[in-house]
Amino acid sequence: MRTLLPVAAALGAAGIGYATVVERNWFALRRFEIPVLPPGSEPLRVLHISDAHLTPRRERLMSWIRSLDDLDPHLVVNTGDSIAHVEAVKYFLDSLGPLLDRPGVFVYGSNDLHAPVPRNPLLYLQREGSRKRSSKSVDLPWEKLRDGMLEAGWLDLNNQRGQLTAGGLTIALAGVHDSHIKRDRYAEVKGPADAAADLRLGVMHSPEPRLLDQFASDGYDLLLAGHTHGGQLRVPGYGALTTNCGIDRARVSGLSMHPEISPAGGHTAWLYVSAGLGTSPWAPVRFACRPEASLLTLVPRWA
Ligand SMILES: [Fe+2]
């Protein structure tokens, strides 16, 4: 036992070091092809970013986000939790850099509104516990964040609909504010998605099933969300311990359909949940769940 304890302690320290220093900065670009466009359309490249939780010192993350412009996306979708510090707005906008010159849309996550504080990590395993705002949390300058993206011409989709042209295609959009803190107001965007558009895109921070149901039944083709961090700490062979919202563990990140079983006469949408770029500064670890951005190449529907 005396020899095993130091070995276990050394392994534990190595694991924490790996999760904090190595994997948290080991950014992955995920690529998926999704058949949602009308027949004959040219491919549309959508860059999906989420959950950067940016603080001023994360230079590696900032330069990696900036490098994503090399992918030449037609559209950028930011599903929120972009900042985690009162001074992070300018760093986040600098990180986006040339991406701001492209068509873009955004929604907020709760962490865009309030700075994170140290918390009992076990609260993350309890949905209601993780929703509660700490009295020590300070407000973040989400208006400044919004203004920076609006000035670049990006669309604010927090409980709003919109339309834009990207890659020569007309895209009808709707989005909601963060359901995790009950700011979503689907009633303000509900109704059939524009059937005349080339693509109908639903955008939200947290992939709450009741919202996914509504977007899908209103005819949205592709739904994009973040929030889950892919579980952030995954157990090899088991996966995420929690999704921190209502979606099932199997769909904590990646591409799936919603509903998973096509309803009779109903519409089924593609769903992509990003595992996100960052972590709360108070939980700076990722294990078996690399930080990511996603390049979703939209192509014509299968015949
Ligand atoms: Fe997040």
Image (spheres, rainbow, N blue to C red):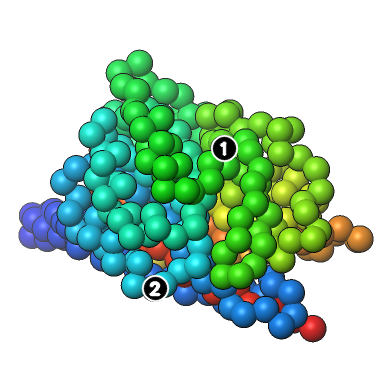
- For this orientation, the residue located farthest to the right is 265
Q: Is residue 139 or residue 241 the one in the foreground?
A: 139
Q: Amino acid at mark 1?
A: Asn
Position of residue 71 relative to residue 112, above or below, is below
Residue 49 shows up from this direction: yes
Residue beneath disc 1: 158
Q: Quadrant of residue 291?
A: bottom left
Residue plotted at (64% across, 46% down): 162
- For this orientation, the residue located farthest to the top is 135
Residue 15 shows up from this direction: no
Q: Is residue 200 or residue 82 the one in the foreground?
A: 200
Q: Is residue 280 or residue 82 the one in the foreground?
A: 82
Using residue 188 as the reference point, say whether residue 255 is left or right of it: left
Q: Residues within 10 Å of mark 2 (few under 14, many from 20)?
A: few
Q: Earlier in the sequence, mark 1 or mark 2?
A: 2
Residue plotted at (40% across, 58% down): 101
Residue plotted at (32% across, 31% down): 116
Residue beneath disc 2: 71
Q: Position of residue 238 (x, y in %)?
A: 47, 62
Q: Quadrant of the C terminus?
A: bottom right
Please tell me whether mark 2 sits on a helix, a strand or a loop: helix
Q: Residues within 10 Å of mark 1 (few under 14, many from 20)?
A: many
Please tell me whether mark 1 sits on a helix, a strand or a loop: loop
Q: Position of residue 43 (x, y in %)?
A: 59, 78
Q: Quadrant of the N terminus?
A: bottom left
Q: Amino acid at mark 2?
A: Leu
Q: Position of residue 206 (x, y in %)?
A: 55, 44
